[in-house]
Image (tube, rainbow, N blue to C red):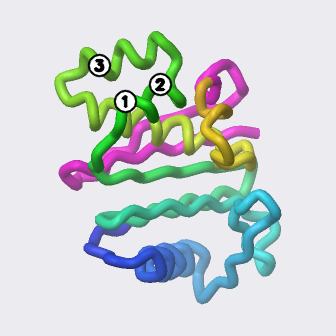
Amino acid sequence: MESGEWRTLSEQRAAAYRLLGELTGGEVVVEHDDKGAPYLPDHPELSVSISHCRKAVAVAVRSKGRVGIDVECRRKIGDGLIARVCTPDEQAVVQTASDPTMAFLQLWTRKEAVLKMRGTGIKGFGSMVGALGPNGSHVIDLETCLPDVVASLATGE
């Protein structure tokens, strides 16, 4: 993970690609499949995942099995979004947390990391509701050392 202050999407993406190049040993070509998932045509043996927000970029690379990563910065979250992507139990956890916004974003990163690992992405938020059910994936929350930034990593076969 790398921290900084990137104002534009292209700056965030460039920082992520630089980090990915450092992990793979050189400049990389990144392409995207029909669902938007990144892959490295020059390294087909690697599973990669990329995420960025205005304060952080994160990449994950795995040689055996799939990987998904997500990083999110604090932002305003509407009740409608929470209702669309959370189960009733998850909504209760978010609403009773000491910091509901960050609790929601941590849950979001877990779900998005799983969906990226599966290769489905978040097209339509409906798939996020059941994302953390039994599915053979392992999800961990990552320590970011950045205030108001959360991240999660998911791995699977």
Kindly report the distance in space between the C-alpha atoms of the residues bearing marks 2 and 3.
Answer: 11 Å
Q: Secondary structure at mark 2?
A: helix
Extreme residue toward the bottom, this view: 27
93 to the left or right of 126: left
Quadrant the C terminus occupies? top right
Residue 48 point in image, percent of width and height: 65, 61
Residue 86 point in image, percent of width and height: 50, 24
- For label 2, the crowd category at 10 Å Cα-Cα, with few meaning under 14, some 14 to 19 and many 20 or more, is few
Can residue 150 be found in the magenta stretch?
yes
Residue 114 point in image, percent of width and height: 61, 39
Which residue, given by chain and number where applicable, does mark 1 sit on? 79
Q: Is residue 1 shown to the viewer in this render? A: no
Q: Given this view, does label 2 or label 3 mark the residue nearer the observer?
A: 2
Can you tell which quarter of the image residue 132 is in? top right
58 to the left or right of 112: left
100 to the left or right of 82: left
Which residue, given by chain and number where applicable, does mark 3 sit on? 95
Q: Secondary structure at mark 1?
A: helix
Residue 32 point in image, percent of width and height: 74, 70
Q: Which amino acid, mark 1?
A: Asp
Can you tell which quarter of the image residue 77 is in? top left
Which residue, given by chain and number where applicable, does mark 2 sit on? 83
Q: Secondary structure at mark 3?
A: helix
